[in-house]
Amino acid sequence: MTKNPSDEQFTTVVIPHLDDAYALARWLSGNSADAEDIVQEACLRALRGLDRYAGGNARAWLLAITRNAAFTWLARNRSKALVATEDIETLARADATTPEEALIAKAGTAAIELAIAALPPPFKETLVLRDINGLSYRDIAEITGAPLGTVMSRLARARGLLMAALGRPETE
């Protein structure tokens, strides 16, 4: 059986960045099940658009597709007033040595999860793309279609709102 050239391109361009696509979809949707649906849709869109992929940053390209798929999916499947969240996996819990430390780690993670989930969508996506996915300001501007200065101000505002929600001063 011969491989289709688009299969090889999909394997090299899309597959390495699926974890990042899932993480973005998870943060934008608020839960794992919806994120899986969003990433599946994003993969279908990426496969259909491979012939238009001009090279460059494949991760940013896939995350832009994932972002668009998330907003389309959320508009179609959720009421604008509905906000769904679930606990994120607590990596710190695995390192905790006592039940108290595990509880503190979980509570801290849950507070961060809720604070991020409460951010307005433009701030939330900018924060997630930069601080969780580690994208450059330029990549975020390309993904969101916002000017570079807007990306920088959204990130500063998102961090400020996050710190205020967590009860910490912004100038730490």
Image (cartoon, helix red, strand yellow):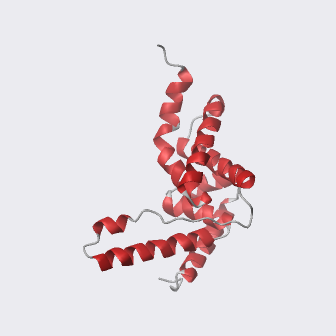
Instruction: State the image coordinates of residue 38 (x, y, percent, origin top left).
Output: 61, 47
- In the image, residue 138 sits, relative to residue 164, either above or below, namely above
- In the image, residue 6 sits, relative to residue 82, either above or below, namely above
Instruction: State the image coordinates of residue 72 (x, y, percent, origin top left).
Output: 72, 50
Judged from this view, the residue extending furthest toward the top is 1
- Quadrant location of residue 52? top right
Instruction: State the image coordinates of residue 114 (x, y, percent, origin top left).
Output: 55, 72
**Residue depicted at x 65% and y 37%:** 45
Which residue occupies the foreground of this view, 105 or 9?
105
Q: Is residue 98 left or right of residue 113?
A: left
**Residue depicted at x 56% and y 39%:** 56
- Quadrant location of residue 157? bottom right
- Quadrant location of residue 95? bottom left
**Residue depicted at x 60% and y 43%:** 61
Instruction: State the image coordinates of residue 135 (x, y, percent, origin top left).
Output: 53, 55
**Residue depicted at x 43% and y 76%:** 107
- In the image, residue 126 sits, relative to residue 158, either above or below, namely above
Which residue occupies the foreground of this view, 82 or 6?
82
How many marks the image carries: the answer is 0
